Amino acid sequence: MSQYPIKPEFVAEGKLSDNERLKAESDHLRGTITADLQNEITGGFTGDNFMLIRFHGMYQQDDRDIRAERAAQKLEPLHNVMLRARMPGGIITPTQWLAIDKFATDKTLYGSIRLTTRQTFQFHGVLKPHVKPMHQFLSSIGIDSIATAGDVNRNVLCTSNPVESELHQQAYQWAVQISEHLLPKTRAYAEIWLDEEKVETTETEPVLGEHYLPRKFKTTVVIPPHNDVDLHANDLNFVAIAEQGKLIGFNVLVGGGLAMTFGDTATYPRQAEELGFIGLEHVLKVAEHVVTVQRDYGDRVNRKTAKTKYTIDRIGLDNFRAEVEQRVGVSFAPVKPYQFTTRGDRFGWVEGIDGQHHLTLFIENGRILDFPNKPLKTGLAKIAQIHQGDFRMTANQNLIVAGVPASQKAQIEQLARDHGLIDDNHSEQRKNSMACVSFPTCPLAMAEAERYLPELVTKVEGLLTKHQLSDDHIVLRVTGCPNGCGRAMLAEVGLVGRAPGKYNLYLGGNRIGTRIPKLLLDNVAEAEILDTLDQLIGRWSQERQSGECFGDFVIRVGVVAEVKVSKTDFHA
Amino acid sequence: MLLSSLVAQASPLSESQLTQLQGLLSQLNPIQQAWVSGYLAANAQLAGQLPAGSSAAVVAPAASLTILYGSQTGNARHVAADIGNAASAQVYQVKVQDLAEYKNAHLKNERFLVIVTSTYGEGEPPENAISFYNFLFSKKAPQLAELHYAVLGLGDTSYEFFCKTAQDFDERLAALGAKALLSRADLDVDYAADAKKWQEALLKTLVPHFQQANTSSAAAPAPSVSSAAGQSYSKQQPFAAELYTNQKITGRDSTKDVRHIELSLAGSGLTYLPGDALGVYFNNDPALVRELLLLTGIASDTPVTLDEQQLSISQALTEHLELTQSYPAFVSRYATAIGHAELQTLAADKVALRQYLAERQIIDIVRDYPGTLSAQQLTDALRKQQPRLYSIASSQAEVEDEVHLTVGVVRYDAHGFPHLGGASGFLAERLAEGESIKVFVEQNNNFRLPENDDTPIIMIGPGTGIAPFRAFLQERDARGASGKNWLFFGNPHFTQDFLYQVELQNYLKQGVLTQLDVAFSRDTAEKVYVQHKLLQHGAAVWQWLEQGAHLYICGDGARMAKDVHHALLTIIQQHGSKDEKAAQQYLDQLRIAKRYQKDVY
């Protein structure tokens, strides 16, 4: 199947997983989705289509809060669809914003726009009759959701750095090009959702392959010193290297990823590793062939160990690199020096080198909705009505009003303040905390995350205050399952859901997101978590070295061991 | 001619034979005499001693009484059966029959005919009487100079066309030359006592006719009135069924509150068939009773007499009297009792009164016109509670000694107050699981699955009209019936109002349901109803009909059943290449063949 000679020793042996059958039989991701759209008896998708719609950027979900209630009512779960848009680099125009704002209000069960850690927006709660019109509507404003989920390369992230505008513009263009280069070539999306004509050609997928990738695949373009995209959560990372403000190439890092399976020590969160430096002329080919090597050697037998990180650990980084070099026809140069100093967003106004102004708004949990006394969604719509620049969704679920002329600063700030989009009472702790969506919509959720985070932060704020650290913060992340969306596996304090009200507590990540934390407490309730944090924050307050962050402290004093090599250290 | 006056000259008997016979007759009561008469006639024929037709006096057809009923809810059937039972004790041959089963050609041979009928919708005959009604008003109707008849109408004075069908029958039979045995009675919802009086009057006029007509004729000794089910529990003696389950089956955001109710019939011996209904008696809302007593200034423990029994007014109101359905008679009685001139004027204006009563319960009238009256006056002003009938939503082949209902809770705000239906409110809100409700089984032979399990069926049941079809599907599933099953269902919203969605999905998966088409009227810009879905699948519907499919409609009779009927006519015209009249005839034929059955309300 591959156009390259396959080394059998690198191929995982065994019976292919059912997802492989599904992809092979899907007629290039078409399945029988069209028939399901006609089916008026269920609000869900049936059989393989349940998985296939993911390749079109959607997940079938249901309102889990009322699942049992509806079962008693002899009603099926309240099936609906979550849509994740493809917005490489997270840039969206005010016109587009106003359109999605209206759609969210009119056609979704939750009426919200959700900014996500994939630097894009999601609609939650779209009922089946609205799904096809939704894609047509998005298409009309220049947005699609192709391959934002499923076993493909997903939405490509790019550091949100409006200050160094020229460098960001170059990096952003690469993010867009990489995204498009790695898209599926099938016309299934256009045919199914946009009613485009079926063209009688022999469809092939030269990059992703006829059976697509073994597992999801995530790519970033990151501009040091900001690691806002959390590169270690991604399979493939292009670290921008500039000289005199001009982009000259990228250090390429591969094999990051945070997902794991509880109880399976063959799975673990893992940092990305360096392949080397490449010039701009090779970017697309390198991206393509990291993908094709993973395509050909990723584990298609066991989906739990199918991601790039396991492929690299199984065949070795050098072999992986050699395969890529051979296919691209170029050798990686040694990595150029680079350094990360920050990961969080810089809230408030900053002025770019081009003289434009940029306002970063903290959006708690990324949930844009009109809350009581906090009409965030209305406020953003009002800003969009007058804003002349663009909006930038960040990988930390926040939003930048970018490209504001000095003359409009005051007006936009006033709108933001009037609608609760700027709240001076938000602590550093709150601004550095994050959660995935979890309940009630995510089918994988084991415990609350988004809905729990605000009160957890308040309690942690209390602990910091108690120990005279109220101006400091800990990178705190909660995720409802071990799948990784909330990136708790790169937090200083990470909570990963086990069961309602129960979490695993991981400690020891660092501020800039280059270290995987380690398990301290298994399957515990809030009280025990807070007791533990109370003691440790107390010790941190007393015993910390100058400027020492919490994650570094707990490792230095031996509360948890440092995870250096995930494969050996994480479960040790 | 009486047997006692027979003389030898007028008979083939010898003097001694005649004496012996008269001696025997003096010891026999009329029924024994009738039996002997029939016995001897049959005996003679069997012995071949008597050529058929040789003696009119012996073998002439016995004068018989035919009692026909046109019934929508079963009340007319019950009254007809009661009359039949009473008559069979006094006259010789009684036949009680559903109008739908009556052979119209027999009408010209009838001598004594009683019709008990309700009226449906806007003055139309009930479903099972349509064929007879059309025949009677057609040119084919025979002259009926020999016929003696009586008509009893059952109805509800809150409807504009109160007892219209009974009036129509009465006038038409008279026009065809038939003689009325007694004048027609039009009875309101609390008909029981008046029906009994009418029955007694009827028998009083009938018996002399029969004594004349049957003087020397043979008669069947045993009345052919069969008891409805041979069960000891009945409408008069309902069974206290325990509530197992009261489950709301509309979603939390639904505008409707529909309950799936499961009751236990364990130990009752009650049985039912898919298509039957369950009659339920209920207690009125105690809050409603308290408010009524407060407004009328009556103490709750004031004793009153109801049906010759003494009980407290609050018990009478809670357990025996009708409070949630209003009716004209109450308004006039109440207006008189409280001496309210304005209300009396309203009570006299039938059109205005009907409008006034449209959305009002008894309590609304009293709220509008509070006044004081005695507890007994209030009791007498109100009519007795009538049981409510619900189409049964289960098959005993699946649920054994349970019975399931699909109950739409009547709940609305009007005139500044929330309102709750009587029976539906009792079942949904006041009856706790484990408590009991009085029930009886009401047969409905006009809503039955085909006898042949291979016959395809098309079921049209939007809203709670789905109830009997759940029973049909359970039954056909349990029987392993191979006939195809097609269900049309509709309601406002897919996510909230898809009654029994998961069960129906499973029936589809298992193949018990061949096809399921749904219309959710409020999900789309243009409202889509079941009739639109039928039209959309017109070609297939026609094909099924030509394959012998039986058609069933259950649910709202005011609009849905009519719209569906018109859709069916359109389909038959379009796909059967028929004109409107031929299409109508096609549907008529289906109805006569019992292939087009309705259970509408």
Image: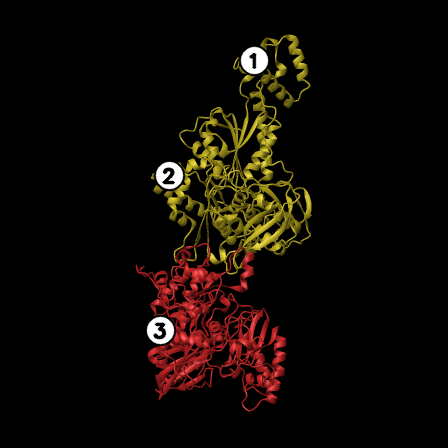
Chain colours: A red, B yellow
Q: Mark 1: which amino acid?
A: Gly
For label 2, the residue is B583
- Rounded to the nearest angstrom, the CA distance separating label 3 from label 1 is 104 Å
| Residue located at (55% from left, 15% from top) | B57
Q: Mark 3: which amino acid?
A: Thr
For label 3, the residue is A95
Q: In this view, does B321 lie to the left or right of A248?
A: right
For label 1, the residue is B48
Where A422 falls versus A6 (above or below)? below
Q: Nearer the viewer, residue B369 or B26?
A: B26
Q: Which of B288 and B367 is in front in this view?
A: B288
- Rounded to the nearest angstrom, the CA distance separating label 1 from label 2 is 52 Å
Where B27 falls versus B342 (above or below)? above
Q: In this view, does B314 lie to the left or right of A506?
A: right
Dot 2 surroundings within 10 Å: few (below 14), some, or many (20 or more)?
many
| Residue located at (43% from left, 55% from top) | A39
Location of the C terminus of chain A (image quadrant): bottom right
Nearer to us of marks 1 and 2 is 1
- Residues at marks 1 and 2 touching, judged by CB atoms closer than 8 Å: no
* Subunit of label 3: A
Location of the N terminus of chain A (image quadrant): bottom left
Mark 2 element type: helix
